[in-house]
């Protein structure tokens, strides 16, 4: 996937890809880049939960997903991320464990387990 990243005023940054734009900022006018990273974990789990339910004809009304993260006070690095899934009382009993396994298949989570190599390099400028 190719993304074009544009630097805007006041440290805002946008990523453009496939006709979409994702804006980030550190001043509260848009999510900060790291907040988007954390949100990608919860929304990815939500996608897998949604698809699990859709494929089985289970309504998603009443399902609540909450994500909590804990930072190390010394390093400011996230130590743990907990994704809590609250299922409504009428959720089919036979699928309660399976839906949690489905949420755990999140692609973002799997990439953290085996992280990609990230290369930052200088290239020749493209003439406009």
Image (cartoon, rainbow, N blue to C red):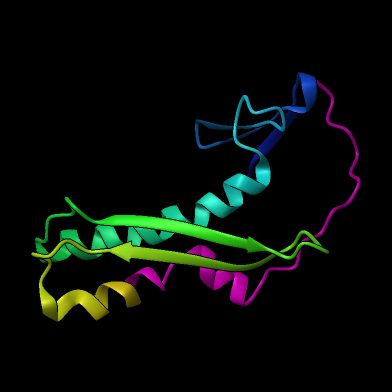
Question: Which image quarter: residue 56?
Answer: bottom left
Q: Residue furthest front?
A: 73
Judge whether residue 1 can be spotted in this image: no
Query: Which residue is nearer to you in this view: 80 or 51?
Result: 80
Query: Which residue is nearer to you in this view: 107 or 29?
Result: 29
In the rendered image, which quarter contains the C terminus? Answer: top right
Residues drawn in magenta: 102-128
Going by the image, does 24 lie left or right of 64?
right
Q: Is residue 127 magenta?
A: yes
* Residue drawn where x is 41% and y is 73% of the image: 104
Q: Reply above or below: 125 against 57.
A: above
Going by the image, does 121 lie left or right of 50?
right
Residue 7 rendering spot, x and y as whole percentages:
77, 27
Residue 13 rendering spot, x and y as whole percentages:
71, 31
Query: Which residue is nearer to you in this view: 28 or 54?
Result: 28
* Residue drawn where x is 46% and y is 58% of the image: 67
* Residue drawn where x is 57% and y is 60% of the image: 69
Q: Reply above or below: 29 against 31.
A: above
* Residue drawn where x is 66% and y is 48% of the image: 34
Q: Is residue 6 magenta?
A: no
Going by the image, does 123 lie left or right of 12?
right
């Amino acid at each position: 996937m190719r993304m074009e990243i544009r630097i805007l005023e006041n440290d805002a940054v946008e990523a453009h890809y496939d006709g979409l734009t994702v804006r980030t900022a550190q001043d509260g006018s848009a999510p900060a880049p790291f907040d988007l990273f954390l949100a990608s974990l919860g929304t990815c789990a939500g996608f897998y939960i949604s698809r699990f339910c859709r494929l089985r004809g289970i309504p998603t009304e009443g399902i609540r997903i909450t994500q909590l993260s804990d930072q190390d006070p010394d390093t400011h690095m996230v130590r743990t991320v907990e994704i809590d899934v609250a299922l409504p009382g009428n959720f089919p009993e036979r699928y309660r464990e399976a839906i949690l396994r489905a949420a755990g298949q999140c692609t973002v989570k799997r990439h953290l387990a085996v992280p990609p190599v990230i290369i930052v390099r200088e290239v020749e400028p493209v003439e406009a």
